[in-house]
Image (spheres, rainbow, N blue to C red):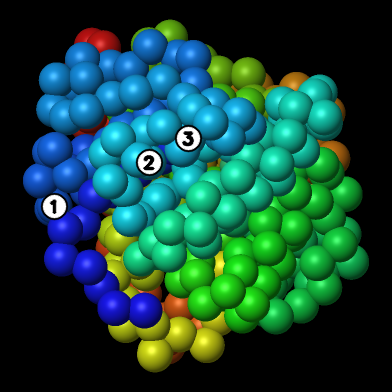
Amino acid sequence: MSRKKTKRILVTGAVGQIGSELTMELRKRYGNDKVLATGRKTKPSKMLLNSGPFEFIDITIRDTVEKVVNEYDIDTIYNMAAILSAVGEEKPLLCWNVNINGLYNILEIAREREMNRVFVPSSIAVFGPETPRDNTPQDTVLKPTTMYGVTKVCGELLGDYYFKRFNLDVRGIRYPGIISNETLPGGGTTDYAVEIFYEAIKNRKYTCFVKKETMLPMMYMPDCIKGTIDLMETDLLKLKHHCNFNLTSMSFSAGELESEIKKHIPNFNCEYKPDFRQDIADSWPRSIDDSAAREEWGWKPEYDLPTMTEDMLDNLGKRYE
Ligand code: SER
């Protein structure tokens, strides 16, 4: 598996929360024209459109992916297109179709062309109520109770299978909740930890859809992007795991997040009205053991709750106040 000289990268889901910022960082590192951003329906931002190539594709329709892979001579794919946990419960069939059938198309296309590398994101949603919830181990029970979780377990196994069976270098991270201020997340359970910042800045109040004491592992976008690219750039020989790295940088409850925001905005008011997403959150870990990522490829996050909160409020404040 030699690394080819010309690196042409395809990012699917490039209009999404992680994809949009990942695309910009990849363009910065490897060159604007070397990174093809793709989306399915949502209009891309001016930043995405003006900085490099963009195409509409649908990963569930194989031809649309093959066409751009051939046209742009792609040898690396970041498959960020996915249906998240809350929408996945409302539309399980769609979730399966995008997260599994779509992924299958990506892996097959990469295998046939002997591509350099494929990134397949996973999630803390692979865990379930039978998994230890504190300091959740790297290798443990994977019995999720959401369709999103089922597709993510399956995705990890498929990726590892393609590596063992076909020598295709597939890698992946179990993302915790990702907090960011460029593109809003769409349809996840951890979305409250992003929405709360926007509402605190714009309206000084927020109604949170999980309980105050709900604690989940989280990460700030700069760490998420750094971790993703660092894993993809690691020498293959260093990796013992491939598609399922636990990764985290902080864990806090919704109430602790509220208190941290109040240090900056004392008149911020947060109410708690749990909905169906509470059950999903309750089935996921409270904190994660990511020592495998630290040992195998040197993972080390930069942001914690206070520094992330300060940076979020600073960025959103400049935009909305
Ligand atoms: N942020 C995702 C979700 O809430 C978890 O991977 O669905």
Relative placement, left or right, of 263 versus 283 is left
Q: Quadrant of residue 115?
A: bottom left
**How many numbered marks are there?**
3
| Residue located 75% across and 27% down the image | 94
Check whether the beta carbons of the residues at disc 2 and disc 3 lie within 8 A of each other.
yes
- Does ligand 1 reach within 8 Å of label 2's beta carbon? no
Residue depth check, mark 1 versus mark 3: number of the one nearer the observer: 3
**Viewer can see residue 17:** no
In the image, 41 versus 299, the foreground residue is 41
Which residue is disc 2 drawn over?
Answer: 69
Q: Earlier in the sequence, mark 1 or mark 3?
A: 1
Q: Is residue 24 above or below residue 45?
A: below
Real-space Cα separation, disc 2 to disc 3, in angstroms: 6 Å
Q: Is residue 201 above or below residue 249?
A: above
Q: Which mark is residue 65?
A: 3
Which residue is disc 1 drawn over?
Answer: 30
Q: Secondary structure at mark 3?
A: helix
- Does ligand 1 reach within 8 Å of label 3's beta carbon? no
Real-space Cα separation, disc 1 to disc 3, in angstroms: 22 Å
| Residue located 55% across and 18% down the image | 206
In the image, 82 versus 201, the foreground residue is 82
Q: Position of residue 236 (x, y in %)?
A: 38, 82
Q: Is residue 22 above or below residue 110?
A: above
Q: Amino acid at mark 2?
A: Val
**Viewer can see residue 9:** yes
In the image, 189 versus 270, the foreground residue is 189
Q: Earlier in the sequence, mark 1 or mark 2?
A: 1
Q: Amino acid at mark 1?
A: Tyr
Few, some or many residues within 10 Å of mark 2 (<14, 14–19, 20+): many
| Residue located 52% across and 88% down the image | 240
